[in-house]
Image (cartoon, grey):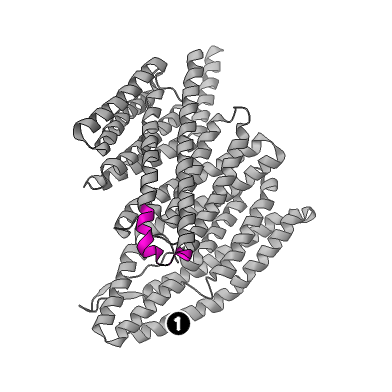
Amino acid sequence: MNPALVQAEIARLVQTLGTIGAPLQALLPAAAVVLVALAAVPAWRALLGPAVSVSAFVLLLGEIVLAWFHWRLYALAVVVSPDTGRVAGRVAVPLWVESEKLFVWALALALMAVLIRKHRQELLPGVAVILAALMAGAALWGKPFTEPLPSFLGQYLGYLQAMASGDPTRMFGAYQGMEGARQFYYNTVYMWVHPPALFFAYATFAISFVATLVMVRERHSAYETTAYRWARLGYLPLTAGMLLGFPWAIIAWQGESWWWSGKVNMSIMMWILYTALLHARLYLRRQGMWRWVAAISILAFLVLLLTYLATYIVPGAHSYL
Amino acid sequence: MTETVRHKNWDFALTVTTVALLGMLGVQSFIGTLYVWWATNAVPGFEIAGYGRFVWWMNAIAAPQVVALVIVMGLCVPKRLFDRTALVVVSGAMVGVGLAAWAFTGSFQTGLAVYLALAALIQAGIVVLTVAGARGPSYLTEGRLVKTGSGLLHQGFIAFAFVVVALQRSAFMLPAFWIATALTLLGTVLAFYADRFARRRTVRLEVDRSFTAE
């Protein structure tokens, strides 16, 4: 491995991604404004369905570009042991970390919004507003095309510089950090299963939340059934994603009191609330129970949003602060 | 009829207690999260000096709630199988055996583990009876697949609680965890997604019966 050569190749790749992706990234906030406008003005709502489909297409196109970027990066991001000079492995950066999280969540929601059949007309305005917020967030906060993977690239480029320095202490320290991140973070099965399962669940819960709001407004049980069906669709990936995180946490966060980390706490709260929602529904025929079901559903989604934000606000084992 | 109503009230009371306990833990977690957020910004050196004390307090406050949750979860198990009188006896016996194990070994953890093992045993019996289509176990849901799913899901929760209570430092921890995960996920699939399939089968059988009657 020639560190200077790899560094130059990565710089070229990042530049190409920026060139291809910048128009897509600029399109996202514009599409978000259009979606909100179409959702807000009843006379324009007939155009909402096609607008959501176009947004889904743009996001899918963006995801294909990002997948290409990750594939090229995988070919370049080699980790070499300074001791033996042997290749320890390549870093397979998942498609849903750092700057790409909101993008993936937006993509999942957009694809599901295209597939909504039951109560489509009633649900689409609310879903479009959430989709618009995610798309705007993905473009303005995440910037996956113009500022890709800042944490990974920072660490990997630091590793390359250390390897080029010839200083054994620096080389060994950088190698240990990079190899640790490769083995216990980027390349773990957990990182390839846990986040996409949760983003799939988050997208279904967003639609369930909108259906609950429509139920509260219309006071009709048919919307509750729709809200329940979307919530139960998300419950399996949510449970699976969280359970699969448990053995990983035991190994990766050994010695830390990770169960009181803000993000872990909020995640468990969210799971508890969705479990309570699916259980409370068993008693829906009791007088006034629908109000409780609606309240739990709304609270659960608010906690979901806080859970997502907790990673960036509250320090702890599962924090990016 | 009265028995069914009472049974459902007991079901409802246990569900409300479970939700209340989970809610209390949720509130504690939320307050704890807010506190850490505040303390990290306001108290100098909190992460080094204060975080350990925070964890100790959080564990101390959560412990009785978690124990209560485990006990309530155990009590949820025999309700599927026994009528009111037998239910009180069986539930009391489970708690009694757990307490005896605690007294005998001097380890509260062992007491809880024995209690959970009993609950897991009864739950396994309930699942077998449900799969066999026996009329004994009572559920709030309809359809054998959905009921089996509910049974497996609860078996998975009990197994997971057992892993946390008894196997955290054991070599069996990971295998037991994967069994709990498999039970929970299979149970979730059947409990929440099998109802349409079950309903379609029922409709077809009714149509067949009407043809036979003609």
Q: Quadrant of residue A19?
A: bottom right
Is B149 above or below relative to B163?
Answer: above
Residue B70 rendering spot, x and y as whole percentages:
36, 35
What residue is rendered at 37% in x and 80% in y? A158
- Secondary structure of residue under mark 1: helix
Image height check: is B23 above or below A126? Answer: above
The chain that hosts pointer 1 is: A
**Residue B211, percent from left and from top:** 55, 17
Q: What residue do we see at 51% from left, 43% from top? A: A274
Q: Residue at x 37, y 39 (%)?
A: B64
Q: Which residues are magenta?
A: B40-55
Between A213 and A110, the one lying in front of the other is A213
Q: Which residue lies at the image location 53% right of the left edge and 39% below the top edge? A: A277
Q: Amino acid at mark 1?
A: Ala
Residue A161 lies, with reference to residue A306, above or below; the image says below
Q: Which residue is mark 1?
A: A11
- Can residue A258 be seen here? The reply is no
Q: Main secondary structure of the magenta part?
A: helix
Structural crowding at the residue carrying mark 1, measured as other residues with C-alpha within 10 Å and reported as few (<14), some (14–19) or many (≥20): some
Q: Is residue B49 magenta?
A: yes
Q: Nearer the viewer, residue B63 or B50?
A: B50
Please state, as top left, top right, bottom left or bottom right, where the C terminus of chain B lies in the image.
Answer: top right
Question: Which of these two is toward me, A134 or A107?
Answer: A134
Residue that lies at the very extreme toward the right in this rendered image = A43
**Residue A273 inside the magenta-drawn segment:** no
